[in-house]
Image (cartoon, rainbow, N blue to C red):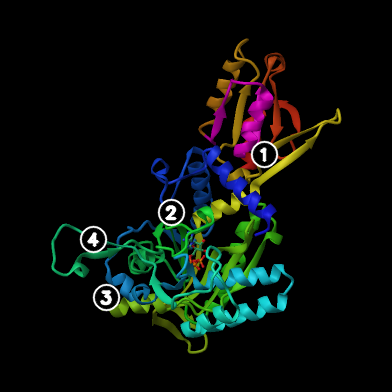
Amino acid sequence: MSSTSENTFQAIVSHAKEYGFVFPSSEIYDGLSAVYDYGPYGSELKKNIRDHWWKSMTQLHENIVGIDAAIFMHPTTWKASGHVDNFSDPLIDNKDSKKRYRVDHLIEAHAEKLALAGDKEGEFDLLKNMDELLKADDFVGLKQLIEDNKIVCSVSGTGNWTEIRQFNLMFATEFGAIASDNPEDNKVYLRPETAQGIFVNFLNVQKTARMKIPFGIAQTGKAFRNEIVARQFIFRMREFEQMEMQFFVRPGTQGHWYQYWKEARLKWHTDLGISAAKYRYHDHVKLAHYAKEACDIEFEFPFGFKEVEGIHSRSDFDLTQHQLYSKKKIQYYDNDIDETTGKAFGNYVPYVVETSIGLDRMFLLVLSHAYEEETIQKEDGTSDSRVVLHIPPVIAPNKLAILPLTKKDGLPEIARELMDECKPYFKCFYEEKDAIGKRYRRQDAIGTPFCVTIDHQTKEDQTITIRYRDSMLQERISLSMVKSLVLAAIQ
Ligand code: ATP
């Protein structure tokens, strides 16, 4: 990361804390690594992103329904899904500093250094070799690659590495109070992804909501991963929230739906007003144990292009596995006519295309996109500055700030009437204290798209001053138009 990007990123982290978006978890006890709490504006923003996603999935797609499955699931779920055996990352320790690295991250960081030094070819070769070795689970080869490239630990500066080991990322805990000689008997996992709650409920949902293929099941909720190296603020957390949708399709049509969802999901991002130039697709070389085809939607964070969402063609892997382990038939009867045979498609295990986005990562994306330290040139030749969050209005924590110019002369009463008119429809904020300029700056810093000021003229002609966050332009409009203007902007 360049020093400017590093500074911007640190500024965003500090801003998030100072303005009540994100706090380190249990901070009075010095925090808990890679666990965070969301404050008043943060919880509002997070909820708005979740609602926006939920609406786009379940309200705007007639063939997608939602569920809310429990975090604890029968332990066999994770055997069947492959997580007990395969959900692990290769790690390596530096013997001198005792610092632990995820092998791919260590090599990627070195590749980035090569690129910064202008050695694009070296970067390309290194990443290509790494991808091939990871794909083959060749840990000896990976260690050799680290040694051949003289990759050293950033703390000790040495290349004194341990062997590479696999590390399972699932958290386990004990379930119930029944003592058992074998601790494995009571072991349950905190779900590492929300998807399995959807798969095990496939028939329940399909039957009760009378869904016809192709259809989707959406879910948002907490997931837990004991990440080897947790870093970059809320980018990689040990407790986080996912927004996932599993789309069930007829075998043979998965290629079409994979393309469809790849495009539809990127469009969801750019429809928020975030520039397409900040995004790119990254096709996976090393596929997860369940995936047949997979890509990431990457966003240019201050620390470079990184995954925010995954689109995975999961074949019939999960449903077939659950069928096998539960010994219960999980099939769909398709009575549409297959034109080639002239008969109904009949019974089959559907194929699945998944879209999976991290809510916290999306939150960081929104903050990274929104954050600006702006210099304002004034008419008298002097300059001023402000920190502004250009959060898309539809997900902004507060939509409207209502600010009476003074605390007297009946202005608060008019402002309160406007509050009462608007607050059933969207989140409003009321404030009388401090000079108006100061109040505007505070709203800029939390990303409120609209501020209205009630002044003495309001009493005369029922007009107010509306100030737009991004342009800082101010205009007088009728008091009666405020609600509809804000509503139009947040649809
Ligand atoms: P990564 O390669 O970054 O570890 P992944 O490919 O393992 O991510 P998926 O299993 O595809 O991630 O999970 C889907 C989404 O969940 C990711 O795109 C990301 O937005 C989010 N996510 C995954 N792990 C974390 C985490 N530890 N903290 C925050 N969000 C996460």
Tag 1 secondary structure: strand
Q: Tell which of 146 and 377 is nearer to you.
A: 146
Quarter of the view holding residue 110: bottom right
Quadrant where the N terminus sits is bottom right
Residue at position x 44%, y 77% from top?
A: 164
Tag 4 secondary structure: strand
What residue is pinned by disc 4?
A: 174
Disc on the earlier residue, 4 or 1:
4
Residue 371 in the image: x percent, y percent? 65, 46
Quarter of the view holding residue 185: bottom left
Q: CA distance from mark 2 to mark 4?
A: 22 Å
Q: CA distance from mark 4 to mark 1?
A: 47 Å
Judge from the rendering whether residue 176 lies leftward or rightward of residue 219; answer left or right. left
Residue 430 covered by magenta stretch = yes
Mark linked to residue 33: 2
Residue span colored magenta: 425-453
- Mark in front: 2 vs 4: 2
Residue 306 in the image: x percent, y percent? 59, 63
Residue at position x 60%, y 30% from top?
A: 401
